[in-house]
Image (spheres, helix red, strand yellow):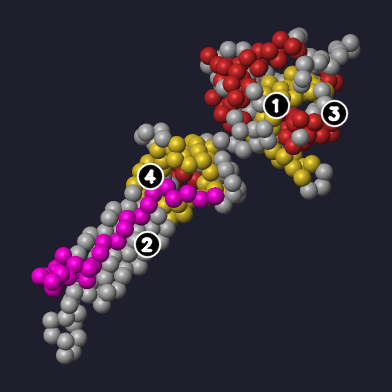
Amino acid sequence: MFIDSAKIFVKAGDGGNGAATFRREKFVPKGGPDGGDGGRGGDVILEADRNLATLLDFRYKAHYKAERGAHGQSARKTGLSGRDMIIKIPCGTVVRHADTRQLLADLTTHGERVVIAKGGKGGRGNQHFATATNRAPRYREEGQPGEELCLQLELKLLADIGLVGFPNAGKSTLISKISAAKPKIADYPFTTLEPNLGIVPYYEYQSFVVADIPGIIEGASEGKGLGLKFLKHIERTKVLAILIPASSPDVKAEYKILTTELKKFSASLAAKPKLVVISKLDAAPDDFKLPKFRGIKTVGISALAGDGLQELKDALWQAIHQPELVEV
Ligand SMILES: Nc1nc2c(ncn2[C@@H]2O[C@H](COP(=O)(O)OP(=O)(O)OP(=O)(O)O)[C@@H](O)[C@H]2O)c(=O)[nH]1
Ligand SMILES: [Mg+2]
């Protein structure tokens, strides 16, 4: 299952208490206060990890606690600090406060870290509290509690290209041909219910990532079909590839419906650079001509026959890396 959200509880370690002790040494009567400080509690840290792809693990384990600091000891010994708790999350996870929905972190690059709950400070030992009038204080501080909160984690896939089209347009077939992804393919609408990511190898050492998402229909913004919720997965893509089958009764009208629905979901999504991909060319009527869209490149393919795929990969690559040079 593709899990794209989870709620977890995190608690940083409490600080250790300061100690209230007095020096005890041979031949030193009435030794002064020597209580050490408590150790710092461990922090809870989130770290983005490119080897993780889902938030599934968080469905099984939802509580995370960092270690508390040790208490101070006699002879001015400070307690050991608690160990930090490091929670690894997939790159592209947005972290919010579960109650207030406040955005706390947005980790996109491998290895990026954020302290999400700070450990409590250790309390000071009685060695700090001797004064001229009270040379043997019994007072010492308690450690401060570690921060605790509930987090809402939400994974937004990180892809370069988002495939957008009506159900049955051939999006999943395309991704299965140009990447190692193995999505379900069938000739009924809404075969794809969850996003699929495919890594497309490009020449020897390069690659880019394509996201295949469920189909969109007219009225999706009002909840028709699967609605538009899943579009959040392509909000961060650089380029949208709009797939329209050559067998469509009206390619231009289909394009208009798709872009209108995109706009209703988010203006910034709709404003992304686009390519039009005319799919299923093998099933096109004999007199079919590739349509022209103002300022937008159009590529024709047949994923089944393997036609046009290299040209498409070149166009996608260029749209990602040099959008200004894409020739229409
Ligand atoms: N003739 C022909 N049929 C194709 C081509 N590509 C896909 N199809 C067929 O079109 C149907 C739908 O393909 P999918 O790849 O599942 O379409 P989709 O856009 O992912 O559909 P949803 O997941 O429902 O949105 C399947 O029966 C495919 O075999 C093509 O290049 N030529
Ligand atoms: Mg599909």
- Image quarter for residue 181? top right
Residue 306 in the figure: left or right of residue 225: right
Residue nearest the viewer, comparing 271 with 62: 271
What's the magenta region? 112-139
Residue under label 1: 273
Q: Is residue 320 left or right of residue 217?
A: right
Disc nearest the viewer among 4 and 1: 1
Q: Quadrant location of the N terminus?
A: top right
Q: Determine which residue is flagged by label 3.
A: 308
Q: Secondary structure at mark 3?
A: loop
> Which mark lies nearer to you, 2 or 4?
2
The residue at 78%/16% (across/down) is 293
- Say which residue label 4 marks: 9
Dominant SS type (magenta):
loop
Residue with the most extreme right position: 286
**Residue 110 percent across, percent down from the top left:** 59, 49
How would you rate the neighbour count of disc 3 (Cα within 10 Å): few for under 14, some for 14-19, many for 20 or more? some
Q: Give the CA separation, mark 3 to mark 4.
A: 49 Å
Q: Which residue is mark 2?
A: 82
Residue 116 location in percent, x, y?
42, 47
